[in-house]
Image (cartoon, rainbow, N blue to C red):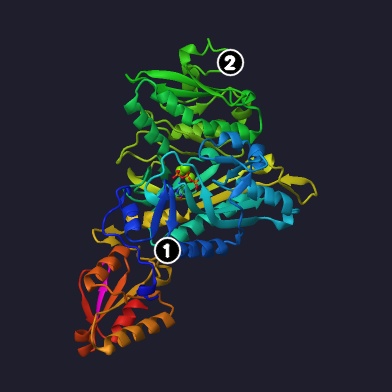
Amino acid sequence: MKASQFLFATLKETPSDADIASSQLMVRAGLIRKIASGLYIWLPMGLRVLQKVERIVREEMQNVGAQEVLMPMTQPAELWQMTGRFDDYGPELLRFKDRHDRDFVLGPTHEEVITNLAQGELRSYKQLPISFFQIQSKFRDEIRPRFGVMRAREFTMKDAYSFHVDQASLAQTYHDMYEAYTRIFTRLGLDFRAVQADTGSIGGFASHEFHVLADSGEDDIAFSDASDYAANVELAESVSTAERQAPSRAREDVLTENMPTCKMVAEHLDIPLEQTVKTLIVHGHTEDNEPQLIAIVLRGDHQLNTIKAEKIEEANVPLTLASDEELKAAGLHKGYIGVDLDMPVFVDRSAAALSDFVAGANEENKHTIGLNWERDASITRIVDVRNVQEGDPSPDGKGSLRIKRGIEVGHIFQLGDKYSQALNCTVSGEDGKPVTLMMGCYGIGVSRIIAAAIEQNNDENGIMWPTTPTVNDSIAPFEVAIIPMKSKEENVMQTATALYEELKAQGVNVLLDDRNERPGVKFADLELIGIPHRIVVSDRNLAEDKYEYVNRRETEKQMLSREEVLAKVS
Ligand code: ATP
Ligand code: MG
Ligand code: MG
Ligand code: MG
């Protein structure tokens, strides 16, 4: 590419509404432009980066056998009504009507559409397992769009979905996807961690997030320095922040946020809420650290109330509250959330797992722990650790905890049959009887990755793209810039052009900076954009048969022969 013909949209000044390093640099380097809150145009320079990330993601999805599809961003509301998410999803879901007064949504995610597709196209267990993916725009009406493309309203996501006849097959594909994600973020040269996560509004039983470590991250993640333990401390954060701000009502508010877990249990077992999860008992503590029971009561209408223990009898709702004695007898103590032990549906299946969980909880801990449930209603892991601090012992008994900020760039879920039940997605099984499919879903914030990569790699002069294990995977918009110094000698331009053509022929993404600008301006632009290799061709250097080479990550200039230069950049 010749720079004189390319849209160089660099800015000297930092835009006043760009809030963190990556969003400032992305605008200044001419990668993106904002057109409204949370809405961005990808300029040619930025789109090159986006497409490079897409290429790596696409290759790894294909490697695990996922087939690419492209679904519309606009989705009929009926599908969302069938799964209940038309009402449940909340204000992030943009709902609108067409000219015929029919309801539609702009897709924040595509479980409904893909399940509808699978329902129509899949007939037999012999076609399974099968996975689909797409790389496409999503719309979420984020309450607080910020950090540029990191938390945008319209953004590029890779979303994949898998379909299975049983849990074992789902677990296998989930594992393959986990490995594929690990390869993607490794190839991208990012410093990342996979962590156990809550399943949020998508629902499901097992879930991992992939976080790029950076101080500007919005999540706290806790991990052990001596084992594989790593978890998102999302809930921990919200409790401690809320408690600090409003000690008297904080806990109830925060507990309200814990409900997806409970609701998910009920939905998953496909039993009306009022018959199943009668009470989610929370053994909390008061401001003075006095033990106190709070019950969360779930009603059939999905309404949630939190009631202080002493008020429970007054509330005319069907519930059972375990007494302090009962909790102690069950080995449960201060600082956890437990599901009512009286519930017949859980007792036989969860007792063992529950005692394991309790055995793992520490006598003195003041942590509140969210539970996740598998299909057989056993506790598979402890998701959240509350008020954890750097240096605390780990939850798995190995090493001590470290806490870092992370940017969520990927999220994988085992969904079970939540969507296939609602949308009647079955195939005929080996015995000829219909089987409701099990599903997994796997998201990557393709556009967010770029902001995250820049958060991890920048200096006072601008962007530095991550160092990738192979040069081919570099996501820099151009790998090499060649700058011919202004000269009366034809020779300079000819030599620069010849080198440019040679690198181009080798498949290197090379930029010939033939713009009519002073060298200082060019150097500053190329550093801002973060081009990894810079080669200057000048009269003086050519007289010695040398090229001036500098790497974006080094300050030292080197005088190199043609062969040495080629070896550096190809
Ligand atoms: P967050 O916790 O940051 O709001 P999420 O958990 O709501 O993200 P998922 O539903 O898990 O997001 O979507 C899959 C991926 O899409 C996320 O891991 C993230 O990388 C990306 N993503 C989600 N919301 C946004 C957004 N507003 N802008 C850019 N990328 C996003
Ligand atoms: Mg979100
Ligand atoms: Mg999240
Ligand atoms: Mg997520």
Would you say the magenta stretch is mainly helix, strand or loop? Answer: strand
Position of 65 relative to 346 (above/below)? below
For image coordinates 51% across by 45% down, the residue present is 207
Question: In this rendering, would 386 be left or right of 177?
Answer: left
For image coordinates 57% across by 49% down, the residue present is 441
Question: Where does residue 422 sit, x and y in percent of width and height?
Answer: 68, 39
For image coordinates 28% across by 89% down, the residue present is 490
Q: Which mark is residue 317?
A: 2
Question: Where does residue 559 sit, x and y in percent of width and height?
Answer: 22, 81
Question: In this rendering, would 409 be left or right of 431?
Answer: left
Q: What is the quadrant of the C terminus in the image? A: bottom left
Q: Is residue 380 visible?
A: no
Q: Which mark is residue 49?
A: 1
Instruction: Give SS at disc 1.
Output: helix
Which mark is in front, 2 or 1? 1
Question: Where does residue 279 sit, x and y in percent of width and height?
Answer: 55, 22
Which amino acid lies under the numbered mark 1 shown in the image of this protein?
A: Val
Highlighted range, magenta: 548-553
